[in-house]
Amino acid sequence: MKTLIDKAMEKPCNLSLDEIERLLSLSSSDDRTSLRKAARALKHRYFGNKVSIRGIIELGNICAKDCYYCGIRKSNRNVERYRLSIAEIERMAETNAALGYKSLVLQGGEIESEENTRFIEETLKALAKFDFGITLSLGEQTKDVYRRWKDAGASRYLLRIETSNRELYSTLHPPSCDWRRRAECLKYLNECGYQTGTGTMSSLPGQTINDLAHDIVFFNESKAVMIGMGPYLSHPDTPLAKCDLISNQDKLERALDMIAVTRLYLHDVNIASTTALEALAADGREQGILAGANVVMPNVTDVTRRKAYQLYSGKPGLDETSLAAKERLDAALAAIGEEIDYATRGDSPRAQGE
Ligand code: SAM
Ligand code: SF4
């Protein structure tokens, strides 16, 4: 195992699929600790003890899709639908700026319409005065739409492939969702000049370690410069919930293994320690950093809106103000010898090198 880790640390993409699978299959806690320590050492090699920060604004929960795992899927009638106004988004962006964050993520349901495309364009123009690095996460769109949003001021786009296994993908989505289109969208995003991010969920029903190893290889093949992964967590109003049989502890371990092995394979990409980890353990995000992640994405949406945007049950921070969350995060990171990088927008070294 040590030889394998040493080999991975030499240079990016220095592991075969079989070797990635072996690192994802470690069962002793000593081995897992060594894996995570090595991944964190690599994080330090490229990013020092700095953690990049991006505030997330949850723009709206209206979605045209019906993903079987997601709490805001179109068919869930127990959700009160909302879309923020540009004035509300500007106010939340001011909070982001006041907290000293230089990056912003605008995330929401997937809507393909001219009206929505214009709305996002107008929003991006209204946010230009803040000079944030802006990431969009608004699902599958045409190449033309991606280009228009890039021209309007977005510089990054996060589109998780969810799983690189097409058959597994088809068990998680209705037939109208096409894995190939999602993969093609990632290509469009690269062609439009975005810093493109992708990612997958772990602990999905029916998913194998081999699938997860393929996911990591897929991240490299898709030329992603940022990775946002997290455990699948069930939501009671979704068809997939009844298939969710994995314990929270196992989900946490698996998600941390994915972060560690992705760091060992890709070296210098941005890897997020996502909110879903915090849903599994109070210190889940710190554990993500200790396993090699270098980005955190605190929610800066007004607390009054957060309850309507629940992808899974147990969403953390529903009532915590953005300021209180920042103070808690500062303290938690200091306790593990890390600090928030307030000086930069946190572009991936890979993207800067291009
Ligand atoms: N609608 C856009 C899309 O799907 O790309 C962006 C927003 S969507 C809510 C962002 C991500 O949430 C998805 O890519 C998916 O991985 C994640 N997600 C949805 N339901 C989830 C669940 N039950 N557990 C964990 N992650 C979930
Ligand atoms: Fe919509 Fe995204 Fe949820 Fe799928 S994951 S239902 S596209 S918000």
Image (spheres, rainbow, N blue to C red):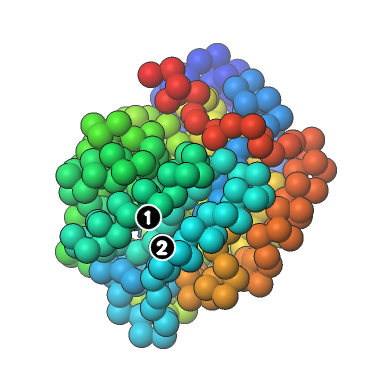
Res. 123 mark: 1
Spatial CA span between label 2 and label 1? 6 Å
Q: Position of residue 117 (x, y in %)?
A: 25, 56
Q: Is residue 96 left or right of residue 189?
A: right
The amino acid type found where label 2 is placed reads: Ile
Say if 119 sits above or below 148 in the image. below
Secondary element at image label 2:
helix
Residue depicted at x 66% and y 50%: 99
Say if 180 sits above or below 299 in the image. above
Residue depicted at x 42% and y 57%: 107
Residue 187: image quadrant is: top left
Res. 86 mark: 2
Res. 15 mark: none
The reply to whether callout 2 and callout 1 are in contact (CB within 8 Å) is yes
Q: Which of the pair 91/198 is nearer the observer?
A: 91
Q: Is residue 27 left or right of residue 93?
A: right
The amino acid type found where label 1 is placed reads: Thr
